[in-house]
Image (spheres, grey):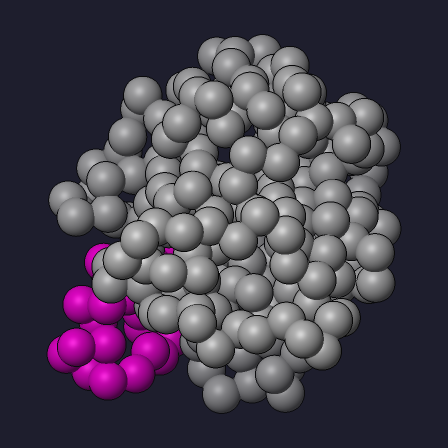
Amino acid sequence: MNNMEYIVKLGGSVITEKDKAMKINYDSLCRIGSYLRKNMPKIIVHGGGSYGHYIVHGILEKKKRLDYTDLPLISYVMDTLNREVIKCLQDYGLPVVSFPPHSICSIKNNELECETGTLKRIVEKGLIPVLYGDAVVSTGGIEILSGDTLMVFLAREYGLRKLVFLTDVDGVYVNMDKKTIIKHLNLRDPRSQLAFLRESNNIDVTGGMRAKIESLKNLPSGTLVYIVNGRKESHLSKVFVEGENPGTLIET
């Protein structure tokens, strides 16, 4: 599977310290860069981590909702994180180009719309666009567009049948206390039970693992989704170099 074109998400919990506001985990971020260089993705998406999530959480605590006046601060904070991600990946030789979602995407009547013309031309030239979770204009004002939603949208747009989610856990847990991992999950199988999934204990304005897996149901049948620990070098080596499943493999 390591020869398949794929899209990867660098989870905010991996590239930042989620319990420390506005702090990047450079060790994890740059280690990931070294492995992506060995097997370059078609597109990269990253999360908000201790940048976007903390800012949005703070706004919602005060105002209970987002409006247009919040877009400048949220976009500035996410752009700050994105610049650091871009710099690290370029240092490892990846031809990455930033694409701020608030400039090309909007949500209309709960449907995501993105202007992908320039994005497609960039990909055709062999460059790697980098998008991220962001605040975007919506029918009702401003909404948070999660990186997970972007992953599904872009995978469908480009016909990519392999998605890799780098998280700070070893996969999807069937038992949180015993840290028991589900190695394989088929979303089309009626016997698959998702009730065991719990929300994340960390501050996450886009939901936890349950929301991530629910979003995968919109992918075409036969898509392979890997959920692996982006902080573990053994996981990175297996998924990007050896083409194996070190965490949880989900089939849609």
The reply to whether residue 47 is in sight is no
Prevailing secondary structure of the magenta residues: helix
Q: Is residue 225 left or right of residue 26?
A: right
In the rendered image, residue 241, in percent from the top left (x then y), is placed at 65, 18
Query: In this orientation, which residue lies closer to the viewer: 58 or 182?
Result: 182
Whether 167 is among the magenta residues is no
The reply to whether residue 162 is in sight is yes
**Residue sitting at 63 percent across and 87 percent down?**
109
Q: Is residue 62 left or right of residue 89?
A: left
189 to 238, vertically: above or below: below
The boundaries of the magenta stretch are: 53-77
In the rendered image, residue 34, in percent from the top left (x then y), is placed at 51, 15
221 to 66, vertically: above or below: above
Query: In this orientation, which residue lies closer to the viewer: 144 or 19?
Result: 19
Q: Quadrant of residue 70?
A: bottom left
**Residue sitting at 44 percent across and 72 percent down?**
196
Query: In this orientation, which residue lies closer to the viewer: 69 or 178?
Result: 178
189 to 185, vertically: above or below: below
Q: Is residue 155 left or right of residue 69?
A: right
Q: Quadrant of the N terminus?
A: top right
In the rendered image, residue 232, in percent from the top left (x then y), is placed at 40, 27
